[in-house]
Image (cartoon, rainbow, N blue to C red):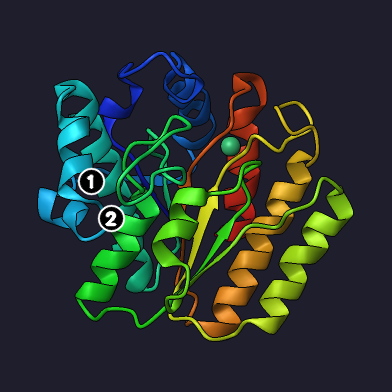
Amino acid sequence: MKIVYHPRYTEIYSSDPAASPGRMEAILRELEREYDFIEPQAASEDDLGCVHTQAHIESIKRDKHLYDISCLAAGGAVKAAQIAVEGEASFGLIRPPGHHASPDHCWGFCYFNNIAVALAKLQNENLIENALILDFDLHFGDGTNNFFEGSEIKYFHPDTRNRDEFIEGIISRFQEDKDYSILAVSAGFDRHVEDWGGQLTTDDYRTIGRLVKEAAERNCKGRRFAVLEGGYNHNVLGRNVKAFLEGLA
Ligand SMILES: [Zn+2]
């Protein structure tokens, strides 16, 4: 298991909750003694251009700091995906998040769609044919869905406020869907009982990680990676990420 992380992710690039001071540090404290860390490079404009319109890229570029950090986040997802393709599980401890970024617009603390940039790059380089994306964030990843609707990359966001149904939904999707070259996860932790969603326990994140690992081992040679999306209660975020990674590893 590798953690993809860049020290610049602690920089404060906006005033939204994903960019709040101390958020990355809360996760780092839980992970830094447990795992190997790898530093990514920023995604190139060409990488972004595979999924975003030039007008959208230019609109983010108007804020140089935001653009630089957003390119680094997308580069972090690319690195995590590349590690996964080679057979090792990985987690992109990145921000800003990405799943509300569409080809030509963005909202919800997102600027570029990190997981979409990563999967499009793997696909363009013929490293994968298709993919399954599990998004367990509290919020529907409209951006990711907009990129891949109708394509061979499938997007899945379990949609229920019932905890048992949520876990069952993941289990049954993994039983039905077996055709993918890589399993990618938009890992948002804002569904936790002490976060905005008030739904999942810390142990549930360990279970979800294990389900991802088992599905990847059955169907795509164990190729699996996750990237951070939401999660806003700094008091529990670190232990939730750690529990998920214990299942995923
Ligand atoms: Zn969210």
Q: Quadrant of residue 66?
A: top left
Closer-to-camera residue (23/186): 186
Q: Residue at x 64, y 73 (%)?
A: 214
The residue at the point 33 percent across, 36 percent down is 111
Secondary structure of the residue carrying tag 2 is helix
Q: Quadrant of the C terminus?
A: bottom right
Q: Are marks 1 and 2 in contact (CB under 8 Å)?
A: yes
Expressed as whole percent of the image width and height from the top left, the position of residue 108 reads 48, 32
Where is 134 relative to 66, above or below?
below
Q: CA distance from mark 1 to mark 2?
A: 6 Å
Determine crowd level at label 2: few under 14, some 14-19, many 20+ residues with C-alpha closer than 10 A.
Answer: many
At a point 45% along the width and 18% down the height, the residue shown is 16
Mark 1 sits near ligand 1, with its Cβ under 8 Å away: no
Label 1, on which residue?
A: 40
Estimate the x, y position of residue 64 in percent, counting from the top left. Answer: 14, 24
Left/right of residue 62 with respect to residue 84 in the rendered view: left
Q: Which mark is residue 134?
A: none
In x, y percent, where is residue 239?
64, 34
The residue pinned by badge 2 equals 79
Specify the quarter for ligand 1: top right
Looking at the rendering, in which quadrant would you find the N terminus? Answer: bottom left
N-term mark: 1 or 2: 1
Numbered disc 1: secondary structure: loop
Q: How many marks?
A: 2
Q: Amino acid at mark 1?
A: Pro
Residue 193: percent from left, percent from top? 79, 32
- The answer to whether the beta carbon of the residue marked 2 is less than 8 Å from any atom of ligand 1 is no
Left or right relative to 171: residue 163: right
Is 172 on the left-hand or right-hand side of 114?
right
Amino acid type, residue under disc 2 in the picture: Lys
